[in-house]
Image (tube, rainbow, N blue to C red):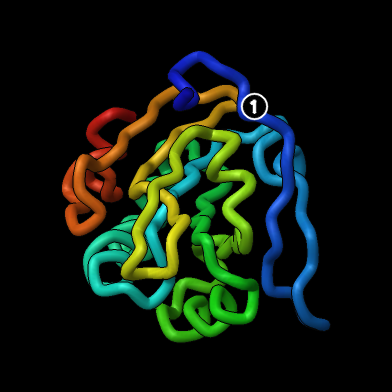
Amino acid sequence: MTIAQGQRLPFGSFMMPGPDGPQKIATDALFQDKTAVLIGVPGAFTPTCSLNHLPTFIEKNDALRAKGIDEIAVVSVNDPFVVKAWRDATGGEGKVTYLADPQGEYIKSLGLDMDMPGLGGLRSKRFCMLVKNNVVEELLVEDSPGESELTDADALLAKL
């Protein structure tokens, strides 16, 4: 079952690039007592994710922060080393927190997983979620992983 607006995020954790290698971070550290955006992408370095979806959040970072967003995070079902390389390649460090969900466990707990055999199987649906103090306020999900118009920064800004 897919998480819905008004529901509390399940507790879980991600891996993220740290100064001394991958480190674990709990969902509460990201979303407790904050207004946050969680972006889900099918894969780091994939064309739609890297060229169309994530760049909108990097470019519109100031506009999102001006609307009260404390945290912008992107999660991908990739290992933390791939996520670090993606962070470095996109130039979003300091604007977006890059998260790895290597086994897709957290994505599955949200009900936002999908099977993409061409990309190795389990992946995240493309989504954008507004979270206030661990509660989902808005959830935008694309019908197709190759589309990003419903879930980009402009679509979220229109909801704020």
Q: Quadrant of residue 58?
A: bottom left
- Lateral position of residue 9 relative to residue 114, left or right: right
Circle 1 sits on which residue? 133
- Could you tell me residue 76's position as x and y percent? 50, 60
Name which residue lies at 41% across and 66% down: 43
Q: How crowded is mark 1: few (under 14 residues within 10 Å), some or many (20 or more)?
A: some
Farthest-out residue, top: 6
Q: Can residue 62 be seen in this view?
A: no
Residue type at the position of mark 1: Asn
Q: Give above or below for 30 relative to 118.
A: above
Instruction: Give above or below for 105 relative to 132.
Output: below
Q: Where is residue 133 in the image (x, y as percent from the top left)?
A: 64, 26
Give the number of callouts. 1
The quarter of the image holding the C terminus is top left
Helix, strand, or loop for circle 1?
Answer: loop
Q: Nearer the viewer, residue 96 or 80?
A: 80
Please indicate, yes or no, whether residue 118 appears anywhere in the rendered image.
yes
**Relative vertical location of residue 138 with respect to residue 81 in this rendering, above or below:** above
Residue 8 in the figure: left or right of residue 58: right
- Quarter-of-image position of residue 132: top right
Q: Residue at x 59, y 79 (%)?
A: 84
**Residue 6 rendering spot, x and y as whole percentages:** 50, 14
The residue at the point 23 percent across, 33 percent down is 158
